[in-house]
Image (tube, rainbow, N blue to C red):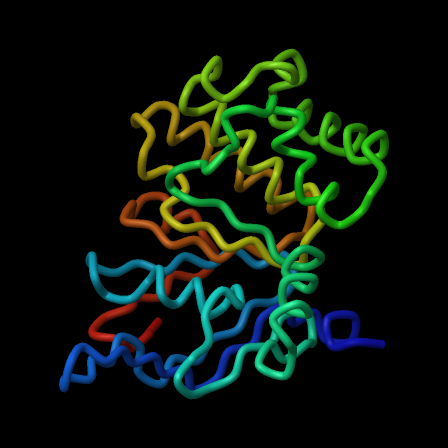
Amino acid sequence: MNNIERDGRVLEAAGLVKTFREGHTELTVLNDVTLHLDRGERVAVIGSSGSGKSTLLNLLGGLDAPTRGTVAVAGQALESQSEKQRCQWRNHHIGFIYQFHHLLPEFTALENAAMPLLIRGVSPRQAAQKASALLDRVGLGKRLEHKPGMLSGGERQRVAIARALVTEPALVLADEPTGNLDERTAASVQGLMQELNDTLGIAFLIVTHDNEFAGRCQRVLTLHEGRLSS
């Protein structure tokens, strides 16, 4: 039985420090950051621009390595893995949603949503079936064959959400997921994320400038001058 099965903990980060060197100057972006998420929890991180929020998500998702500290996702310490192992672990256990959807313009909504499964080696038929079901769930069942250029901003972000969820990850990391949408569309996407979080039991860590959106989460953490507080 792994840690997630035993105690429901999907993310455990302890003592994270991230420094960057610019010439002879060392800049500390994150300083002794510790946090955890349990299964199905929805947590917001707020903070001013340049406070290190995106850097934090990169460390938690294994896209970058901390200068010091540890990160474990679904019971696995990321620093103990090779780059190939981290890539495979991300594909199975972590979903990403960005402010800009990062869809591949030459592929349809269905192909974009299915991409993580295809990368994993799932058969095209199975990947399409699963992606189609998720796109239908997010209201795009009739837009499967549309390429991103034929979709509205809100629709593109819904495809990105489906792509993040298609692997049934333990954790979704969302970086300003509605920051590029108008108010009405943002509210719709926020409601969708909340509904999927409630029904699927996937933990969400959401970086946002939107205090109202943050207030709909179960916990709100503030990142200020590299330190995280509740």
Which residue is more in the foreground, 176 or 6?
176
Q: Is residue 42 left or right of residue 196?
A: left
- Residue 228 image offset from top left, x and y in percent: 33, 74
Q: Residue at x 49, y 64 (%)?
A: 63
Q: Residue at x 29, y 66 (%)?
A: 52
- Residue 62 image offset from top left, x and y in percent: 53, 68
Q: Quadrant of residue 212?
A: top left
Which residue lies most toward the front here?
23
Which residue is more in the foreground, 80 or 223?
80
Which residue is more in the foreground, 196 or 57?
57
Q: Is residue 52 above or below residue 21?
A: above
Q: Which corner quadrant holds the C terminus? A: bottom left
Q: Residue at x 48, y 26 (%)?
A: 156
Q: Residue at x 80, y 47 (%)?
A: 121
- Residue 126 image offset from top left, x and y in percent: 85, 34
Q: How many marks?
A: 0
Q: Is residue 75 above or below residue 190?
A: below
Which residue lies most toward the left here?
24
Q: Quadrant of residue 30?
A: bottom left
